[in-house]
Image (spheres, rainbow, N blue to C red):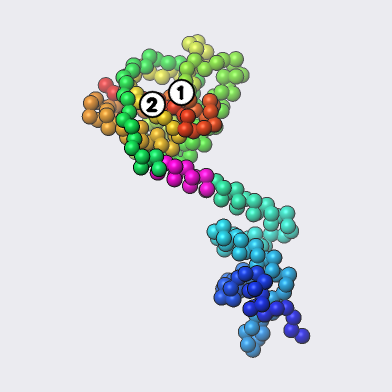
């Protein structure tokens, strides 16, 4: 006895076209309950409507077919819900990145006010630091972790920062998308187990806003140095006057970019 509903009726139940249903059958994503051996007509069970609805929504979220197949194969509703939650988390992170890029592009299109360049000589500075070779794609996470570790160590020693926290970036970091980065926090002289940032003369400009747009200030400051000074291949220093530890609003960030010059 023939059971189930034909493909036309099933398409109305789940709002998927017959063409799409045939394709999902061909790739074994949603297999009909019965296929007539002589006519090839497909029939579906009403219980398959839930899977069809899920597939349609996940495709609307641009989930790859291979991932949808994995979700459907999960044993039990709890495991399926966990797989869906992981995908949604990835989507939310991607949406956040997209919003950041769109905002950055809008700022790039706006008229950028000229920067003010000052010159300053940094005295030798004792710092608590963490250094590593870091890829450009992972520098934000590495800095977040490193500054957390530095602040924890300061707290354990009963010390307060003696100045703005910062980072140094080697020339190799920019040239090869990976190189030495040093996260540091100035400490009082004699704090123990510290390094010393050497004395340097810098051309300095303040970047206002998110770190993602810091390249604009780098470009303007570097162009100024190329025109008016002799730049050095020493690491560039960033000092975080106002950063994530001070505010949750990236628009309020203030970062000094210090370009080493003769």
Could you tell me residue 103's position as x and y percent? Answer: 44, 42
Q: Quadrant of the C terminus?
A: top left
**Does residue 185 sit above or below 66 in this rendering?**
above
Q: Residue furthest left?
A: 227
Q: Residues within 10 Å of mark 1 (few under 14, many from 20)?
A: some
Disc 1 from disc 2: Cα separation: 9 Å
Q: Earlier in the sequence, mark 1 or mark 2?
A: 2
Residue 19 part of the magenta segment: no
Task: Answer yes or no: is residue 5 visible.
Answer: yes
Return the mark for residue 241.
Answer: 1
- Specify the principal SS of the magenta part: helix
Q: Quadrant of the N terminus?
A: bottom right
Residue 183 versus residue 9: which sits nearer the camera? 9
Q: Which residues are magenta?
A: 94-105
Q: Are marks 1 and 2 in contact (CB under 8 Å)?
A: yes
**Does residue 230 sit above or below 179 in this rendering?**
above
Task: Answer yes or no: is residue 134 visible.
Answer: no
Q: Residue furthest bottom?
A: 38
Q: Callout 2: helix, strand or loop?
A: strand
- The residue under the point 60% across, 15% down is 158
Return the mark for residue 224.
Answer: none
Q: Residues within 10 Å of mark 2 (few under 14, many from 20)?
A: many
- The residue under the point 37% across, 16% down is 122
Q: Callout 1: helix, strand or loop?
A: strand
Residue 104 part of the magenta segment: yes
Residue beneath disc 2:
206
Could you tell me residue 229's position as x and y percent? Answer: 24, 25
- The residue under the point 45% across, 16% down is 126
The image quadrant that residue 30 belongs to is bottom right
**Does residue 12 sit above or below 220 in this rendering?**
below
């Amino acid at each position: 006895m023939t059971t189930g509903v034909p493909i036309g009726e099933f398409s109305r139940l789940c709002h998927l076209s017959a063409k799409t249903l045939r394709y999902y059958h061909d790739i074994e994503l949603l297999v009909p309950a019965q296929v007539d051996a002589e006519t090839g007509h497909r029939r579906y069970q009403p219980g398959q409507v839930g899977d069809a609805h899920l597939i349609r929504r996940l495709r609307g979220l641009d989930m790859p077919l291979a991932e949808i197949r994995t979700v459907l194969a999960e044993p039990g509703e709890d495991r399926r819900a966990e797989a869906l939650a992981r995908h949604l988390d990835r989507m939310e992170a991607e949406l956040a990145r997209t919003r950041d890029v769109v905002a950055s592009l809008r700022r790039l299109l706006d008229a950028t006010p000229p920067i003010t360049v000052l010159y300053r000589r940094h005295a030798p500075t004792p710092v608590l630091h963490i250094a590593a070779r870091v890829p450009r794609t992972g520098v934000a996470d590495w800095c977040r972790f490193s500054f957390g570790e530095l602040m924890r160590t300061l707290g354990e020693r009963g010390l307060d920062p003696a100045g703005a926290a910062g980072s140094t970036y080697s020339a190799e970091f920019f040239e090869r998308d990976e190189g030495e980065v040093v996260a540091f926090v100035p400490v009082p002289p004699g704090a123990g187990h510290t390094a010393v940032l050497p004395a340097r003369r810098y051309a300095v400009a303040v970047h206002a806003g998110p770190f993602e747009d810091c390249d604009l200030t780098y470009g303007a400051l570097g162009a100024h140095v190329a025109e008016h000074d002799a730049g050095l291949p020493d690491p560039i220093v960033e000092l975080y006057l106002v950063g994530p530890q001070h505010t949750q609003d990236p628009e309020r960030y203030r970062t000094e970019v210090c370009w080493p010059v003769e």
